[in-house]
Image (cartoon, rainbow, N blue to C red):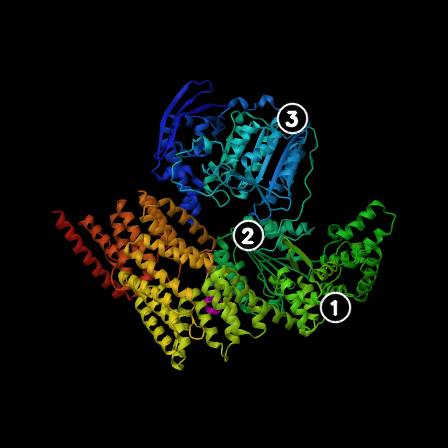
Amino acid sequence: MEDRVLTVTEFVSDARGMGWHWTLSTPRRRPLADKAVWLDAGSWQFAAFTDLYGYLQTYTAPDVRLQQEQKIVAELGEWVAAEIYGSKILTQLGRLRGGAVVRVEIPWEARILAYRPLGAAVLKSGRALSRCGVVLVLDVRPPDEALAIGEDEKDPVGDSLRVLALFSLPEGGSALNLRKERRALERLIDGIARTQRKAIELRVVQYGATTSALREVVQDGYGWDVLHLSGHGQQGAFLLEKEDGTPHAVSAEELAELLAPLARRTRLAVVSSCSSADATYEEQVRLLGLGPARRDPGAPNSDIGSEEEGAISALAPLLAQELGCAVVGMRYPVTDDYAIAFGNRLYEQLLGKENLLGRALAHTVSQTNLETPTPAVPAISSITPVLIGAGAAGLRVAAPAARPATSENAERRREGHLQGSDLPPPHEHFVGRVRVMARIHRVLHYDSRVPGVLFFGMAGAGKTAIATELLWQRRDDFSHVVWFQVPEEGKGDLYGALDNLVGEMERKIPGLQLVHRLHDIQQLRAFLPELTAWMRHERILLVIDNLEPLLTDAGNWRDPRWGLFLNAVVDHQGHSRVLLTSRFRPADLPPHVGVEPVHALPADEAVLLAREQPRLRALMEAHDRDPTTDDGQLVRRMLAATQGHPKLIEFADSHATSWEELEAFLTDHEREWGERGLDSADYLSGGEPVAQAGAYTAVLHTWTHRALAGAEEAERLLAEVLACLEEDDRHSQVLDDTWAGVWQRLGHEGPVPEWRMLLASLEARALSFTQPIKGEAVRVLVHPEVGATLAHGAPPGVREAVDRALAAYQTTIARHALDSETKHGAGPLLLVAARRALPYLRRTGHLDVALALIEEVLVRDASAATRGALLPVLRAAAYQARGTDHEDKAEFLLARVLVGVDTQVGEQRMAALLHRLTASGDHEKAGSVAGYLADRYQAGGRLDEALEMAEQEATHTERAGRGPWTRLADQGQRLQILNRKGEHERVLGEAYRLLAEADDLPAADPATETIEEWRVREALLDTACSAALGLGRWQGCLDLTARIQRSKEQRGAHELEATRTRFNNYGPLLRLGRLAEAETLLDACRTVYKRHQAWDDLGDVFTALADLEHERGRGERAAALEHNALRYKYRPRPPDPRTVGVSHNNLGSYLGRGGDVAGGLAHHLAAALLSALTIGCPDPAGLGNAALDLHLLGDTPAPTTLDQVRAAVEQVEGVRFGAVVASLAPRQQAEDVLEGIVATARDAAQRLADEQE
């Protein structure tokens, strides 16, 4: 079934590009049109055509990715239409109606075309071929067509259509939402079978998708008609699972061989996931989305036809060849939502409406893709689906009628442990709550107009479980998801809770900046409307668990800022949603927030939860087998005694090891309910809970204490220790290392009991649960109410022993990391240990140690997330340190963090501290503050102020009697500032001299030095590298950077720090003509910067990419990328005038070469002015470029005044040129400096004109 045939012949591919001849004909081979195609490898369109997904990843900005992708795809489509199809073929194709099929015959040597977006071509109607319902069927002719299996050789469909679905998700892989996809597939096929009375048998292989499990199901004697593959891939491989759940990579060939027994019956293979298949490394094929490491997207595929590479095929054509079936796959990776929607619609068209596969795919693509791209359906999606197989379009997959659907689904297990996730895992046992879940699902819909919901009720009833289940079920519907749990009383800094929450929001929501406003109530009030706007226009899901510690007994906020904050995040009818949980309802809860009381489970749902417990399930199943026994009565008593409370049901299960034990336990607690005036049997007769929240809480406390009844002393102590530990430290490794110390601190003698054996007893008593992590490692979970009861009842010495033991433990790890950093790469370990040590150190009064660790953390990681996490800790530490020897250190660190979030406030506090220290004669501390300010001023382009601070630092260092390494560091800082002033030759010579001097210095003496040797060496090397760069000594730059990189690797530097060093190599590589190496480097840096939300660094990457495109002769693309660079470089407050100036100068050159000379002049003058205001003279490059612009413009009006320049350059989105200039100089001074720059440039332009005459 085909309407037209496109035949490829004379295919060639070499370093110059790619070409072929193709002919469009009727199915009977009557020629209609032809074209000789030649694609020049030098164009950006060729680079995009050969690796569109990689090109979009590299050349679009994250914050406007959808719009830029749409533009690039559209421009590529116009190029495909003109250069590949041509007007004659395109006219013929344009006459086809929706649902038409064009079979593309591709010889084996040209198989690379199967992976290219041929459907992107834009017709005269303005719509892409793929969006007009025209289906391209790729018929890749195998080398030996005699081996192909035809449709007529297939076994017929039997009594039912058999569908085999493989969902492979090895532990430790990046999680695809396979649970959601699996459930969607199950629901869809079950719905078709039931509503249309079709016989469809679905077999799911998930959780344990090993080669042996797959082999067993593949060898089923009845065979399978449809194969659905979903899972992970990596370079040349598909990931199955080993027996232990870890990844097992099998090549495309191995997987095809494993599936070979399906060939006699399988008609269709559908690969539907966001990483659905892989292609060969050599060909960079992304046919099914499992892309290998990318090469230069502009590099030609010169050797694609080689025999060696041709032997390694992508999975999709391999399945089409080996199984002789049609294959529907994805040419590029797609989102989870798109994969699910696409799969649902395809199966509905194919199985429900019984369309032929070609028409079904056309309808599916049309229905699934949107005119306006969304994060779920970006522009590339419309050209992503691919259909392979000669007769694929005419395939009909019909299910026999009048057969009830059957399903042999594998047992559903809990979602695998999500290592590294900052979201709480889904609760293992979640039953009932159907009505609540249905209501809140509607609330979470984007157009519900309900901004938030409060779940409130007694402790342990399931509020957190409901919020967590909703979080996992609906998180994909939101752009940003933030989970925050308020610490329990005594378990954290409640006053700093809002700081921590906002810090988490800033980490998750790029661009939001609020944390620095929290401690000025006027600033906070002024910003709240902007916060509301964020919630209105963005799609944010904010979950705040456990509000009650923040409330007074009357329901008022202990910290009134919480009321302001919550009112702001729900004062809208936009797209964001807020879920809150609390035992009590806040008194001033906004009226438009929904309220859902959460009580104990009704009796019927309590039965469901009880059946999830192993011992109670056995009891209930025994009653099912023989209802005449007394087991049923015991079950009823259990339900009455637990009153539908989830935690009480777990306690009951822990006492159900025998009939007699459970009976005795229930008798005891029936008496307790009676003492509270409650007939527990009323619960069973009415079906709804009758006890009040206070009674449940009291009973839960009592049951917690009684759960320990009869426990050995060691078991009781372990329970109390777990309750006193911070949540992150309830880990097997921590217990292995500290349990013995706590035992001995409390004066116990004799052998230390094995904590794992004691923990097993606590688990049996339902006081704790373990969550496997890896190998034998586990995380111990303690219910908050149980933990609070245990901690409150613990003897006074237990809390102190735990705090002292953990403070010593985490501090020891941090110090070991410091000692090992230069040798064993322990930098990341330091960050983790320091953060975990802080609460224990504060509670034990060791502020000096806490502050020292905070300083070490900030040296290595000053990211927004780290600053947000440390700010509340430092505020509390500064308050606690008043009047002590630690006051100055705490104030310095607090001001340092504030500088990163509120520059003016932070610098004011730092300057005040410097003045006070200088007046008091404390030269050592004053020198540290002056050095910090010198660095800060240098980064902001305030070079004269920076030099002044550097000189003050050197003076203080000498007066403090510091050693040669510290004095050497002061000299190095001075060189950095001089280098910024353009004195490169002088700086390079002095830097090499100081490095040689460092080699002769003795090891640093801790008594006289304040800086490590590696800091001094790396700083001098970095300064020398910058000077060499300024002098154009490219190989010297690479050599110096390599020395810095080796030093950072040896000491385990943070990934962001190490990446910034690597980035410096791009310029020298570019100037040396090593373009492919430069692009590979930039791609790696871009990935790291995005992961860490280092937006200013990302601006540098866009500048570098623009430079690269310029070198390739793609001026228009270079200008577009430099626009992105400027937007990102202007995001920091304040922006760095130096890096901003570089981008203005570069963009001016790109615009001038593209014909916009006046626009180019404005940016060149902006660059020259910024340089003049920061280093005292205009940048020679910007000045020279401005002179050339004026020469070319002649008498044409040009932007030369400050207002004209500002108006022109601020047409670029995000540019705040006027604000930056105002921060550097008064307006009149800036105007005078610019006037001088223009005059100098005009003189130079006149000299150019005179020379030409």
Q: Residue furthest left?
A: 1253
Q: Please name the residue shown 81% across and 53% down the image.
A: 635
Q: Position of residue 1183 (x, y in %)?
A: 23, 56
Q: Quadrant of residue 222?
A: top right
Q: Residue 468 or 928: which is nearer the viewer?
A: 928
Q: Amino acid at mark 3?
A: Val
Q: Position of residue 1020 (x, y in %)?
A: 36, 63
- The reply to whether the C-beta atoms of the residues labelled 2 and 3 are less than 8 Å apart is no
Q: Tell me if 648 is positioned left or right of 1196 in this view.
A: right
Badge 2 is on which residue? 449
Q: Position of residue 1243 (x, y in %)?
A: 16, 56
Q: Residue 676 or 1071: which is nearer the viewer?
A: 1071
Q: Quadrant of residue 756?
A: bottom right
Q: Residue 509 or 924: which is nearer the viewer?
A: 924
Q: Tell me if 668 is positioned left or right of 771 in this view.
A: right
Badge 3 is on which residue? 157
Mark in front: 2 vs 1: 1
Q: Please name the residue shown 45% across and 53% down the image.
A: 1088
Q: Amino acid at mark 2?
A: Arg
Q: Which residues are magenta?
A: 510-523
Image height of 188 relative to 1086, above or below: above
